[in-house]
Image (cartoon, rainbow, N blue to C red):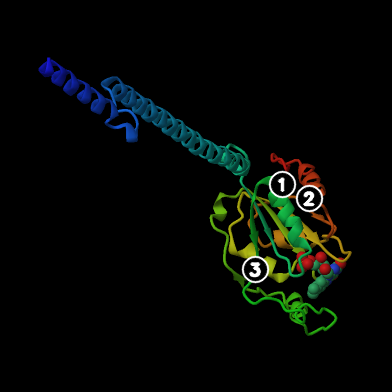
Amino acid sequence: MKKITGILLSVLSVCVLGACSGNANGPAPTSRAVETEAETGQEERAEETEKDEEQEESRETTRAGVENGQEEGAGERQDAGERTGENGEAKVLVAYFSCTNTTRPLAEYAADALGADIYEIVPETPYTEEDLNYSNSDCRANEEQNNPDSRPEISGSVEGMEEYEIVFLGYPIWWGQAPKIICTFMETYDFSGKTIIPFCTSGSSGIGSSASNLHALCSDTAVWLDGARLEGNTTREEMAEWINGLGLDITAE
Ligand SMILES: Cc1cc2nc3c(=O)[nH]c(=O)nc-3n(C[C@H](O)[C@H](O)[C@H](O)COP(=O)(O)O)c2cc1C
């Protein structure tokens, strides 16, 4: 009996000890608990993977959006290019000379409205205020205008002039004529077969014989349109209107 009681006590103490072990840190994991934990871990990892994938997808979408945006931008640039001759219309250049910034904005409006290239005729030696002081008979501008052989040098050049079919030519009136640097420009390039549209600004004088005198300096096969003297405060819209009224196969917008 003593022996049986001893055995029973031993069994009981093993059970009690077994039940207590691990209590300090929560229940000892059963195999089901391990499984559940493994499953939870897998679920968490699966959720994390899903989240990662979603984030990656969203990054992809953003990148695609940027790329599409760039492609759309490129499309818009191409449209502008198409207006300058890549799609059948004539390629247009707006060339201009401007010392006191009256002609410049008009040239910029024209180029912008046409999606055309723009080229500023820049003198090798810039004109100072004194050079332009026409009330002084000896000023540089007056001396140049009085000398038929004067050809002030131009700094830089037009790239690929042969590609342009239409050239808008803007300049100020100096003593009733185009400044002599415009003569330099006309004699520098071959304008054969090109259409040239002169436009000028002035205090009050009209375009007069300035355009026909320039015409005489270049190829007979260059086609000169009448051109116009425009007010210094001509707006972009007025510039586009003037261009669209020329009857050319180009549209200023
Ligand atoms: C040397 C010189 C001569 C000029 N001669 C005339 C002229 O004969 N008639 C006129 O109306 N304006 C004349 N002007 C004024 C300019 O044509 C006018 O200010 C022009 O809009 C300037 O253009 P820009 O600012 O683009 O250089 C002359 C200006 C200068 C500097």
Secondary structure of the residue carrying tag 3 is strand
Q: CA distance from mark 3 to mark 2?
A: 23 Å
User: Nearer the N terminus, badge 2 or badge 1?
Assistant: 1
Residue at (69, 66) in percent of width and height: 182
Name the residue located 54 percent from the left edge and 55 percent from the top edge: 160
The C terminus lies in quadrant:
top right
Amino acid beneath label 2 = Arg
Q: For mark 3, does the 10 Å Cα neighbourhood hold few (<14), some (14 to 19), or many (20 or more) residues?
A: some
Residue located 62% across and 39% down the image: 89
Q: Residue under circle 3?
A: 122
* Nearer-the-camera pick, 200 or 180: 200
C-alpha distance separating marks 3 and 1: 23 Å
Q: Secondary structure at mark 2?
A: helix
Query: Residue sitting at 84 percent across and 64 percent down?
Result: 202
Circles 3, 1 touching at the beta carbon (< 8 Å): no
Is there a contact, CB below 8 Å, between mark 2 and mark 1?
yes
Q: Residue furthest front?
A: 2
**Picture quarter with ligand 1:** bottom right
Picture quadrant of residue 75: top right
Q: Work out whether mark 3 precedes mark 2 in sequence or the reverse, and give the earlier one.
A: 3
Q: Amino acid at mark 3?
A: Val
Residue 168 placement (x, y as % from top left): 70, 53
Depicted 45 relative to depicted 234: above or below: above
Residue 36, horizontal then vertical, whole percent: 33, 22
- Which residue corresponds to mark 1? 113
Residue placed under numbered mark 2 in the picture: 236
Pointer 1 residue Cβ closer than 8 Å to ligand 1: no
